Image (cartoon, grey):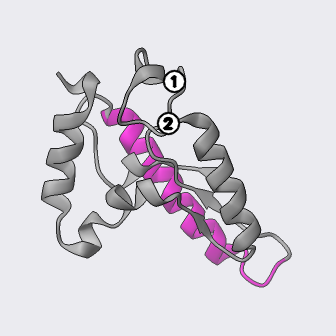
Amino acid sequence: MTVSSGLAFAPLRVTPTYNATKAAIHMLSESLRLQLEGSTVRVVELEPPAVRTALMPGHETNEFAMPLDDFVSEVIGLIDAQPGATEIQVESVKFLRYGEARGDYTQVVATLNRLDPHAH
């Protein structure tokens, strides 16, 4: 299992290197999945949203971040319910993950950066 981020798909202004490395992990996961097709190895990518952890100062109390216990419960439920999934996405990360596909990428990036307490 690799761990990328919702920020692999919509950038946060204050974390350019983090955004870029998580986007690289997404592409690495995609590429490894293709390379290992037909083998016994499965590549599953976990794509977290903002989660209330100590990763960034103030993140533990960020009202827009998902509570850690809720995140873990939803992830475990998804893994159990979708054993063949290639990407594990809790519901709240889909706003970031699919902005481009929905056609509202510009609004997603603007909203993300307007709401993030570290962006000001």
What whole-number distance in Å separates the C-alpha atoms at marks 2 and 1? 9 Å
Residue at image location 27% in from the left, 23% down from the top: 118
Q: Establish if 58 lies above or below 68.
A: above
Residue at image location 24% in from the left, 43% down from the top: 112
Q: Main secondary structure of the magenta part?
A: helix
Amino acid type indicated by mark 2 = Val
Pick the front one: 112 or 8: 112
Q: Establish if 58 lies above or below 69.
A: above
Pick the front one: 70 or 48: 70
Q: Secondary structure at mark 2?
A: loop
Dot 2 surroundings within 10 Å: few (below 14), some, or many (20 or more)? many
Q: Residue furthest toward the top?
A: 57
Instruction: Measuring from the top left, give residue 36's x and y in whole percent.
Output: 73, 74
Asked whether the residues under the numbered discs 2 and 1 touch, taking CB atoms below 8 Å apart as contact, a structural biologist would say yes
Instruction: Measuring from the top left, give residue 102's x and y in whole percent.
Output: 24, 74
Q: Secondary structure at mark 1?
A: loop
Residue 79 visible within the image: yes
Q: Establish if 60 lies above or below 66.
A: above
Q: Does the stretch in magenta take in 120?
A: no
Q: What span is colored magenta in the figure?
A: 16-39
Q: Residue furthest toward the bottom?
A: 38
Residue at image mark 2: 51
Residue at image location 71% in from the left, 72% down from the top: 81
Q: Is residue 24 left or right of residue 1?
A: left
Q: Quadrant of the N terminus?
A: bottom right
Instruction: Measuring from the top left, give residue 25's x and y in whole percent.
Output: 53, 52
Residue 1 visible within the image: no
Mark nearest the camera among 2 and 1 is 2
Q: Is residue 14 left or right of residue 39?
A: left
Residue 88's disc number: none
Residue at image mark 1: 55
Dot 1 surroundings within 10 Å: few (below 14), some, or many (20 or more)? few
